[in-house]
Image: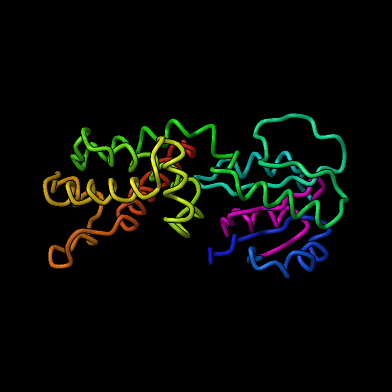
């Protein structure tokens, strides 16, 4: 069974929505609130999914979306529109006219969850991919290996959507396969080969710079998950620095 999506609710109707959604095992509600403080709490908790009401005390939905878009790994956002929603930047993943029936909201949330990457993260997609390429070059992963391309796509995706890492075989590898025209099994195998190549023949200086104290000669090479998670962490940190500047 897949790890539940971590869900935060920011709405004046948070208590009712929480009661309605808490019975669904696909979600783990990590918090809720109805004002500006709720948005700030969501920024701190970094949920996978966020229900964001257009009407919040002390902050409107548009302001909240702008704040969320500055996160290195923003949530997938379902926007509860109480009036006709005007196209804006940044845009949420899904817009749900509100009030609505619970089943309508649930379907909208599931649509957002199924999106490959959060909509709020898309404007920085090229930069994440470029950062992944730079890191792989520092590690001297051979460009001839298919796994290098898969690694870059996987690390860039994990950097903005850690939820993909909840299940590599059911979420991350299928995503990479769809992007690269491969099968999930081929992606996993090629990345494993590339990890072995980097660890045995790559740049020791690059490995130590990126992995630091996690490098253990006796323990052997890292798993795909460990390798990709470390790359994603470095991408997030660099992206956060750029967004602050």
Relative to 22, say whether 238 is above or below. Answer: above
- Residue ID at (46%, 39%): 178
Tell me which corner region of the image, top left, top right, bottom left or bottom right, holds residue 11.
bottom right
Q: In the rendered view, how is the structure colored?
A: rainbow
Report x, y in % for residue 207.
Answer: 19, 50
Direction from residue 138 to residue 111 in the image, left or right = right
Query: Is 41 included in the stretch rendered in magenta?
Result: yes
**Residue 215 highlighted magenta (yes or no):** no
Say left or right for 206 vs 47. Answer: left
Foreground residue, 13 or 99? 99
Q: How many marks?
A: 0
Range of magenta residues: 31-56
Q: What percent of the width, then of the height, locates residue 121?
A: 54, 39
Residue name at image x 82 percent, y 47 percent: 55
Q: Is residue 33 left or right of residue 151?
A: right
Which quadrant holds residue 129? top left
Q: Residue at coordinates 86% horizontally, 54% vertically from top-left? A: 101
Image location of residue 105, percent across then percent down? 78, 52
Q: Is residue 91 left or right of residue 231?
A: right
Q: Position of residue 172 (x, y in %)?
A: 44, 50
Q: Nearer the viewer, residue 116 or 17?
A: 116
**Residue name at image x 22 percent, y 61 percent:** 213
From the viewer's side, name the closer residue of 209 and 22: 22
């Amino acid at each position: 069974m897949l790890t539940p999506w971590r869900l935060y609710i920011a709405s004046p109707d948070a208590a009712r929505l929480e009661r309605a959604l808490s019975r669904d095992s696909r979600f783990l509600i990590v918090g809720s609130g109805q004002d500006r403080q709720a948005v700030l709490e969501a920024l701190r908790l970094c949920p996978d999914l966020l229900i964001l009401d257009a009407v919040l005390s002390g902050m409107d939905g548009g302001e909240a979306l702008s704040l969320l878009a500055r996160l290195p790994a923003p949530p997938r956002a379902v926007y509860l529109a109480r009036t006709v929603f005007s196209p804006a930047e940044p845009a949420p993943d899904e817009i749900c006219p509100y009030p609505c029936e619970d089943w309508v909201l649930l379907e909208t949330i599931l649509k957002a969850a199924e999106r490959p990457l959060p909509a709020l993260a898309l404007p920085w997609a090229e930069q994440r991919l470029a950062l992944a390429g730079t890191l792989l070059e520092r590690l001297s992963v051979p460009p001839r290996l298919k796994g290098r391309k898969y690694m870059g796509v996987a690390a860039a995706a994990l950097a903005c959507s850690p939820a993909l890492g909840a299940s590599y075989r059911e979420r991350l590898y299928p995503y990479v396969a769809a992007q690269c025209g491969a099968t999930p099994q081929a992606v996993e195998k090629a990345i494993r080969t590339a990890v072995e190549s980097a660890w045995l023949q790559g740049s020791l200086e690059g490995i130590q710079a990126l992995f630091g104290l996690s490098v253990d000669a006796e323990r052997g090479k890292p798993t795909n998950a460990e390798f990709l998670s470390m790359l994603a962490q470095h991408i997030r940190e660099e992206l956060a620095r750029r967004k602050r500047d």
